[in-house]
Image: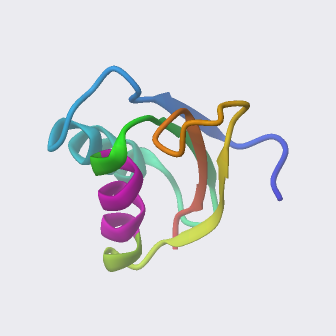
Amino acid sequence: MTENPNYCLDITAEVCPMTFVKAKLLIERMAPGETAEIWLKGWEPIENVPRSIRELGHEILNMTRIADNDPLGLHRLLICKK
């Protein structure tokens, strides 16, 4: 896992579709091979953002639930732009 991603984006306060819009805008600024961590919360972002990123052809390196017993709580998504 990449411990020092090139970018970090917190979209925990956003709702769909803005969660993916903000993630996509970040990816557009990234160079191929760069990584980003994206902080998500809630079932729609947790389901939709990783799926949409994969559909664009980028790689999901890791998705981790962070110190919360709630499955819809805070998640850290690590991606790599292809």
Would you place residue 77 above or below residue 47 in this image? above
Colour logic: rainbow
Q: What's the residue at 39%, 42% (across, down)?
A: 26
Residue 8 vertical placement versus 33 (above, below): above
Residue name at image x 55 percent, y 37 percent: 70
Q: Is residue 51 magenta?
A: yes
Would residue 55 appear left or right of 21 to someone viewing this image? right
Q: Give the image location of residue 75, x and y in percent.
A: 57, 41
**Most extreme residue toward the front, as rendered?**
69
Query: What are the residue bounds of the magenta stretch?
Result: 45-53
Q: Is residue 59 left or right of residue 48?
A: right
Q: Going by the picture, which residue comes out furthest to the left? A: 17
User: Looking at the image, which residue is at 40% across and 79% down?
Assistant: 57
Position above or below: 23 against 48: above
Decide if residue 38 is on the left or right side of residue 6.
left
Q: Position of residue 10 (x, y in %)?
A: 47, 26
Decide which of 45, 67 is in the foreground and name it.
Answer: 67
Q: Which quadrant of the structure image shows residue 51?
A: bottom left
Residue 68 falls in image quadrant: top right
Q: Is residue 82 magenta?
A: no
In the rendered view, does 42 fall on the left or right side of 79? left
Quadrant of the rendering where the N terminus is positioned: bottom right
Q: Nearer the viewer, residue 33 or 76?
A: 76
What residue is rendered at 36% in x and 59% in y? 47
Q: What percent of the width, then of the height, locates residue 20?
A: 26, 48
Please identify the dominant SS of the magenta region. helix
Q: Nearer the viewer, residue 72 or 38?
A: 72
